[in-house]
Amino acid sequence: MVRSGVGSGPLPWDDGIRVQEARDFIMTPPSWLARFMDWLAARPTGQAVAVCFPSYRPDLVTDLAMATGLKLLDFRQSVMRPMGWNAGQLPLSSLNETVNAIHAAGQGVVLHNAEALLAVNDAGSRRRWLAEAMDHAWPQRLILPMALFGHELPDKPAAIHTLAAAELPAESLLTRLGSLS
C-alpha cells in the first residue's frame, strides 16, 4: 500500500495484508455477535430483520453495525433531536424516508433508536409500521434493533433474532451512563 503526499512510501504496518483481513484474523467476535452474523448471512439482503435486545444496549448496537459493515443511523439523535419538542409530531413514514435516503446512497442501515418515534405512537400504529417494514422489499439490508417493542413485531420468526441477556457481555457503569445522553 502506498500513500501519496509528503513522505510517500509503504505504510510501516503494511505487509501486504488488507486491514480488514488483518482485523478479521486478529479479532474473534464475541459469541453473541458471531451467532447473529451466521443468522444474518442466511437472510435475504432486501428483507428487514429485527434484533431484539433484552435491554437498551447502544454499545452492542454499535458493535453489530461495525461487524455488518452497515451504516449506523441513530434516528433519535439525527432526525428527532434537531426538531426539539416537535419531534413527536413526525409521522412514522419518516422512518421509511430516512431508510430510503440511505439505501439510495447504496448502503444498508442499522436503524438505531427508531423506537423513539415508535414510542410516541399508539400500539396499533406501531404494529402496523413494523409489519409493513418487515414485509417491504428493501433495496439494501435494514436491521431494526429493538429493546422496547419486540413484542409488537409481526409473527415472522425467520426475520427476528432474539438475544438472551445471559449471552451478552455485562454492561459497565460507564456504558450505562453513556446511554443516558
Image (spheres, rainbow, N blue to C red):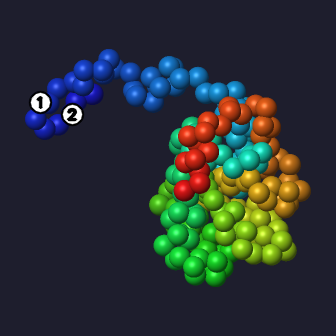
Question: Residue 128: x percent and y percent?
Answer: 81, 71
Seen in the image, is 19 located left or right of residue 141? Answer: left
Picture residue at 78% right of the left edge, 70% below the top: 126
- Three-letter amino acid code at the position of disc 2: Arg
Screen quadrant of the C terminus: bottom right
Mark count: 2
Of 78 and 169, which appears nearest the observer? 169
The numbered mark at residue 68 is none
Picture residue at 73% right of the left edge, 54% below the top: 146
Q: Quadrant of residue 96?
A: bottom right
**Pointer 1: what residue?**
7
Q: How would you rate the neighbour count of disc 2 (Cα within 10 Å): few for under 14, some for 14-19, many for 20 or more? A: few
Picture residue at 68% right of the left edge, 75% below the top: 92
Q: Give the mark toward the camera: 2 or 1.
A: 1
Tell me how far mark 2 sits from mark 1, CA to CA. 8 Å
Q: How would you rate the neighbour count of disc 1 (Cα within 10 Å): few for under 14, some for 14-19, many for 20 or more? A: few
- Three-letter amino acid code at the position of disc 1: Gly
Q: Secondary structure at mark 2?
A: strand
Screen quadrant of the N terminus: top left
Q: Is residue 89 visible?
A: yes
Q: Quadrant of residue 156?
A: bottom right
Of 89 and 2, which appears nearest the observer? 89
Pick out the residue farthest to the top: 15
Q: Please, is residue 120 above or below residue 39 in the view?
A: below
Q: Please, is residue 142 above or below residue 171 in the view?
A: below
Of 43 and 65, which appears nearest the observer? 65
Query: Label 1 near label 2: C-beta < 8 Å?
Result: yes
**Pointer 2: what residue?**
3
Question: Residue 31: x percent and y percent?
Answer: 70, 27
Picture residue at 10% right of the left edge, 35% below the top: 6
